[in-house]
Every structure is written in structure tokens, then in C-alpha cells.
Image (spheres, rainbow, N blue to C red):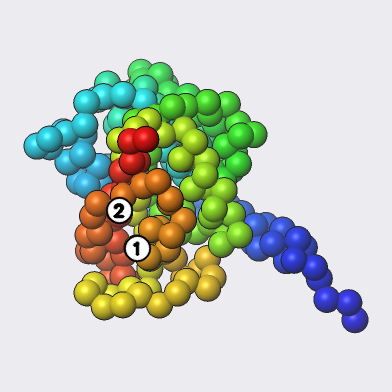
Amino acid sequence: MNQPDTAQVEEREEESVHRALQGFYRAGKAPWDTGVTPPELVTLVEGHGALPPGRALELGCGTGTNAVYLAQHGWDVTAVDLIDSAIDQARQKAETAGTPIHLLHGDATRLDDLDVPGPFDLFFDLSCYCGIPLHRRDAYAAGLTQRATPGARLLMFGYGPEPAGNPAPQVKSWAEGVTADELRARFTGWDLLDVTPGTNSVPTFWFTLRRIAS
């Protein structure tokens, strides 16, 4: 029996991720879509030394809670999600709030196929990257890098295998999440400024990266 080639395996993996995400939204139980803006983003936008409002891109925006929050605080927001029903809900949420947001249904690793010209001063990712198949992660990083202003920030939340303070194992499957070492390797031209453990029952982390000014 012929074994499937690499392209077929990768396509099936992407389809599997898509089905899993659809299942969460159909069940109304997407664990990353709580309807509450996380305090880490609030601190970045409103706290001491907050970023001045500019252009923001949210990757995996879900039903739009955080995109609306950013728009309400003066940001020019573009938001992308792979699931069409999530974008529909985000559009309704933005209309109810009276906040103009550029909402796009599409793949965060294929920004060249979408109307996402950039540049952006802030990227926000709440559990998007950690669910991306490994073979698409370089494309995700390249898409952000090409659209980042010098000094742009990336605030990313994800689960991962690394216990705080201990060496991280190499991520060998998208299901294993993300590590700081992986981000350092993939996001060339960025500094990893901070890694803060989350408060979840499984290991999670907030990663803050900054685009190096060329």
C-alpha cells in the first residue's frame, strides 16, 4: 500500500485542526473564547507604560471580544479567524458596540491571501498559534514580520510543555502547543521580552515579543 506523501499528510492535519475548531464553536464551548478581555491585554493597552493606540491585528479573534475592546480604546483593528461562524458573531458584536473593525474570515498563516496589508503596531494572539500545525508556523511568523512596524509588539497566549524554570522539550506536534525556545527560533528579527506563566490548570504562558527596529 502506498504511503501518503508529505503534502497529503499536511493537508489532512490542517483539515483536522479546522474540524476541531468548528466543533468547539458548534458546541458553544471554545475554551479560549470566554467573552472577557484578559488582564494581560488590558495592562498593555491601559496600564503603566501602555502602548499608544495604533494599528492592531488579532490572529484567531473568535467572536470578537478583544477586537471590540481594542477598537473601543482607539485602535484601528483588523481581526482574522478561520471559522466563519465565529466571524459572523464578531461582526454582530462589533455592530452592537458601534466599533468599526475590519473582520476577515481566513487563515492566519496565509495573510497574503487576505486583505491584510499592514503595517501593524500590535499583534494579539489568544491561543491561535499554539493550535497551528508545525508546517504552517514559519508562514505565520513571516506574515507578522512582514507587516510589523519597527518596535511592534506581539502578545501571545498559549499552552505548552515547559514547566517554568526548567528546560523545554522540543515541540514535535501542534497538539503539544508552543515554547519560548520555538518562538525565539521562528521569530527572527524579534526579541522575546517576557514569558509569564498563566493561571490555568494546564501549563500556559503569556509571551511578549518586540520587532527589532532595522
Residue at the (47%, 40%) spot, across then down: 144
Q: Is residue 16 left or right of residue 142?
A: right
Q: State the image coordinates of residue 100 (x, y, percent, origin top left).
A: 40, 19
Secondary element under disc 1, as helix, strand or loop, is: helix
Quadrant showing the C terminus: top left
The span from disc 2 to disc 1 (Cα, nearest Å) is 8 Å
Which mark is first along the chain, 1 or 2?
A: 1
Crowd around label 2: few <14 · some 14–19 · many ≥20 (10 Å): some
Q: Which residue is mark 1?
A: 180
Is residue 141 among what the camera can see? yes
Residue at the (69%, 62%) spot, across then down: 10
Q: Quadrant of residue 115?
A: top right
Q: Nearer the viewer, residue 108 or 67?
A: 108
Q: State the image coordinates of residue 143 (x, y, percent, origin top left).
A: 52, 40
Residue at the (54%, 70%) spot, across then down: 173
Question: Cβ–Cβ below 8 Å for labels 2 and 1?
Answer: yes
- Give the vertical position of 102 relative to 213 (above or below): above
Looking at the rendered structure, the kind of residue marked 2 is: Leu
Secondary element under disc 2, as helix, strand or loop, is: strand
Q: Which residue is mark 2?
A: 192
